[in-house]
Image (cartoon, rainbow, N blue to C red):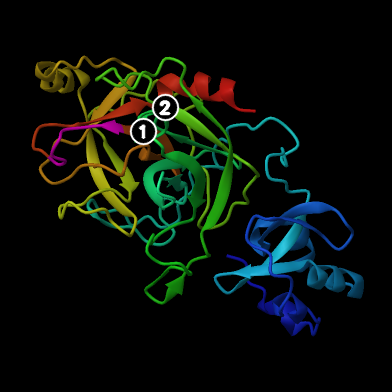
Amino acid sequence: MYNFAGLFGLGLILVGLFSEGLAQGQNEPCFNPIGQPGLCVFLRECQPLLDIYTKPLITPDESSFVQSSRCGSAAGKPLVCCGGLSAGGNSGGGKATLLKPPQCGRDLSNRIVGGQATDLDEFPWTAVIQYRKPDGRYGFHCGGSLISSRYIVTAGHCINAIPRGWQVVGVRLGEYNLSNDGPDCKDNVCADIPVDVGVEKIVVHENYNPQVKSQYNDIALIRFDRDVSFSIYIQPICLPVDEPERSRNNVGTKAFAAGWGRTETASASDVKLKVELDITDMNRCSAVYRPSGLTLRDTQLCAGGKKGEDTCSGDSGGPLMKRIKSNYFLFGIVSFGPNKCGTKDVPGVYTNVAKYVDWVENNLE
């Protein structure tokens, strides 16, 4: 989180940024003070203005430029016109790439206990997907994991197995409590306001077929309509791109899942939850599902099987992750599980991300 208090101590007149300005909405097109087209976003999402705003000394012209960039407000926070950002255009200036430690998978909380609410800054790569429904209502119904400033990875069934008439319209990052429109607070600490981004492109694995019960190749990428800036609450997770992570045998080790899925009360959770799970042997897992007519492959992995500890409906597309040294890696994507979540001796099934790293890299733009 940025601390702007020192700037006001310099006596610079930057208060104009917080005065009333043009009433443009978040992510709407705009023009900055020099006529450059951009998007109306939170200040923390605009690196050119942040570079000015965080300088030890700011010239009067720079101060005036920041003030004049004000374009509106959202949830009581100022929005600025950030030149160079464009809806539907590539603001990144090149092909997206997967990051590697220490640039990814950083989670400073280190407070993981299975089956409880996360802290505000835990798992800052967790994303939630917004859908528009035929009656005009909107809702969040699937998760995902931020893997770069332009992409999340999610489950293919979150795109191709949704109810008729539903449409993916956006992705929210930095979220904690879905029922709260303003900043989320916990233990007298408040997070940044979540960031909503539009969708430019969706790529579902070409061999995913929602009609196949075993849900092979259940993976998809969502490309945003603009880049997002990283913060304490928005960070990418690492993918197992290199060895030894790529071929690591995780069976018998602990992993963690997080999301807003159904709880033991059978209702979706407003706050982001976490659970600790055991990664289980695939042969044993396959034997559990075989009587139901499902055959699992090595492109899938299983985790869980303890009563009352599981991912569930609404967690679909979300992460199954392990901390290796100081960084978290995404090893699984929530795919499917037993009809009754948390059934003893019935693990959940996840897409094995290590088997799809090449696919992910080949589909980034």
Q: How far across and how far down the image is residue 24, in percent?
A: 68, 64
- Report how far apart the C-alphas of labels 1 and 2 lie in the structure: 8 Å
Residue at point 75%, 60% (across, down): 81
Residue 250 falls in which quadrant of the image?
top left
Q: Is residue 334 above or below residue 56?
A: above
In the depicted structure, whether residue 315 falls above or below residue 272: above
Please say whether residue 338 is one of the residues in the magenta stretch.
yes
Note whether 330 is above or below 295 in the view shown: below
| Picture quadrant of residue 43 | bottom right
Image position of 235 with respect to 147: above or below: below
Q: Tag 2 or tag 1, which sits nearer the N-term?
A: 2
Going by the numbered disc 1, the residue's amino acid type is Ile
Task: Tell me the quarter of the picture where residue 298 sits.
Answer: top left
The prevailing secondary structure element of the residues shown in magenta is: loop
Type of amino acid at the residue the image marks with label 2: Ile
Q: Residues within 10 Å of mark 2 (few under 14, many from 20)?
A: many
In depth, the one of 213 and 312 nearer the eye is 213
Taking the image as shown, residue 312 lies to the left or right of residue 306, namely right
Is residue 58 in view from this perspective? no
Judge depth for marks 1 and 2 and give the one in front.
2
Left or right relative to 254: residue 201: right
Q: Quadrant of the N terminus?
A: bottom right
The magenta span reads 335-342
Tell whether label 2 touches label 1 (CB within 8 Å). yes
Task: Categorize mark 1 by other alpha carbons within 10 Å: few (<14), some (14-19), many (20+).
Answer: many
- Disc 1 target residue: 333
On the rendered structure, is 206 left or right of 318?
right
Q: Which residue is mark 2?
A: 219
Instruction: Identify the residue at horizontal 37%, vertical 34% (top origin).
Output: 164
> Is residue 201 highlighted in magenta?
no
Q: Position of residue 213 (x, y in %)?
A: 24, 20
